[in-house]
Image (tube, grey):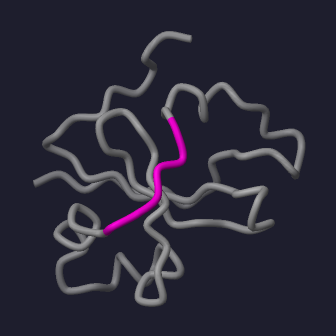
């Protein structure tokens, strides 16, 4: 699969994925063309991050666990509930 979504260093990516190992959603960001789970007690949901005083600074500094390459996630089927997949909402902040 070609690099469909180039991740610009000028942008900050925030979204959600379904994690089958947790049987639930996770708050994620894109870094270096990879997806990172940044879910935490402070940011359990995307709106939690969006309502922060500086969501961009939070997302860029948030520790996380690497999920995998973005292109792999984009190529996965969304038709099977048990698979890793992107969810809405997703936000892109540009500074």
In the displayed structure, 62 sits above or below 9; it is: below
In the displayed structure, 68 sits above or below 3; it is: below
Q: Quadrant of residue 43?
A: bottom left
Task: For the C terminus, give its image quadrant.
Answer: bottom left
Q: Is residue 40 left or right of residue 19?
A: left
Whole-percent x, y for residue 87 in the image:
64, 54
Whole-percent x, y for residue 47 in the image:
46, 79
Identified at 70% across, 57% down, the residue is 19
Identified at 46% across, 80% down, the residue is 40
Segment colored magenta: 63-68
Q: Is residue 34 left or right of residue 81?
A: left
Magenta includes 67? Answer: yes
Identified at 41% across, 38% down, the residue is 34
Magenta includes 31? Answer: no
Whole-percent x, y for residue 45 in the image:
53, 78
The residue at the far left in this view is 95
Q: Is residue 63 left or right of residue 81?
A: left
Whole-percent x, y for residue 67 in the image:
54, 47
Q: In which quarter of the image is residue 89?
A: bottom right
Task: For the N terminus, give its image quadrant.
Answer: top right
């Amino acid at each position: 699969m070609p690099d469909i979504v180039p991740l610009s260093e000028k942008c900050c990516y925030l979204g959600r994925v379904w994690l089958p190992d947790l049987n639930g959603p996770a708050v994620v960001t894109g870094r270096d063309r990879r997806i990172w789970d940044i879910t935490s007690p402070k940011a359990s949901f995307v709106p939690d991050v969006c309502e922060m005083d500086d969501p961009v600074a939070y997302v860029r500094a948030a520790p996380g666990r690497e999920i995998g390459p973005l292109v792999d996630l984009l190529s996965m089927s969304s038709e099977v509930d048990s698979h890793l997949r992107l969810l809405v909402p997703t936000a892109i902040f540009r500074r």
